[in-house]
Image (tube, rainbow, N blue to C red):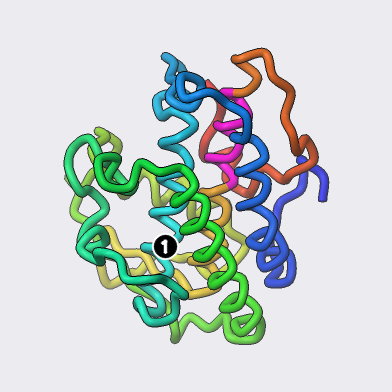
Amino acid sequence: MRESSYPITPSEIAHVYRQISAWTKGELLGLSETQLDRTGTEEWARWSPRRQLSHMAYITTRWFMVLYGTTSLPWPSVDMSQFSTFINTRDDDRRFSSERYGDIEWLYLRFSEACEAAAIQVEKLENENSIDQSLLFVFSDSSVVGTSEERSVDLWNRCLKCHPDGFTTDADYAYGFRITPLATLRHVLWDDLIHLRSIRLHRKALGLSPVYPDAPVGGYTSAYPIY
């Protein structure tokens, strides 16, 4: 799959879910602690490579739990209060707590497990992309994304336009969205691929070539332009 393409079909989504944790680990492997914590003034560089991974592991796990609960994950005993909200503290916006889960190998493992669990579910959902099974999300006009200043409605509208199916507005609410389980897992994967792109941009800024230059960027490239 070339960089210009991105996973849409269930088989493509499942395949990339099974590859992305290795791609991410490969891009981060060998970076020093200083390089892992590098940030920049560009929009994509606000989060360091380490924080990008923490977000990917956290968001993939939490979205999976929204869909299927904790028992579907092959996890050892962990503190599930980490998932009571997307923001553990203001500094831990949509990522695992850096104080408690700063171990990058732990993050690799959590990300890999969540991605494999997601791939299995995508394969089951191949013929079940029905709006009757959709999740409903309702926002207020003032809802923002994490600790950012971006309105949740604006983000969701940007993302909605990128999906071929399974992601719609709900006419019963001023700011309501419906998204099927398959589209949800596609959404999470595309978000992960955008953060993998950011990690690769960090490598480029460090003068390093990408380890996996042919990895797909995902379907959100228009929603998240590079600044």
Quickly name the residue at label 1.
Answer: 61
Question: Label 1: few (<14), some or many (≥20) within 10 Å?
Answer: many
Q: Main secondary structure of the magenta part?
A: helix
Let me know if residue 44 appears in the view: no
Residue in the image at 36% along x and 64% along y: 177
Residue 200 colored in magenta in the image:
yes
| Residue 125 in the image, given as x and y percentages of width and height | 59, 82
- Viewer-nearest residue: 105 or 169: 105
For residue 80, side relative to residue 95 (left or right):
left
Q: Secondary structure at mark 1?
A: helix
| Residue 19 in the image, given as x and y percentages of width and height | 69, 56
Residue in the image at 27% along x and 58% along y: 175
- Viewer-nearest residue: 35 or 155: 35
Residue 190, compared with residue 135, is above or below; it is above
Q: Where is residue 216, by image quadrant?
A: top right
- Viewer-nearest residue: 12 or 155: 12
Q: Which residues are magenta?
A: 193-202
Residue 143, compared with residue 222, is above or below; it is below
Residue 184, compared with residue 73, is above or below; it is above
* Badge 1 amino acid: Thr
Residue 182, compared with residue 210, is above or below; it is below
Let me know if residue 9 appears in the view: yes
Residue in the image at 79% along x and 40% along y: 214
| Residue 73 in the image, given as x and y percentages of width and height | 44, 75
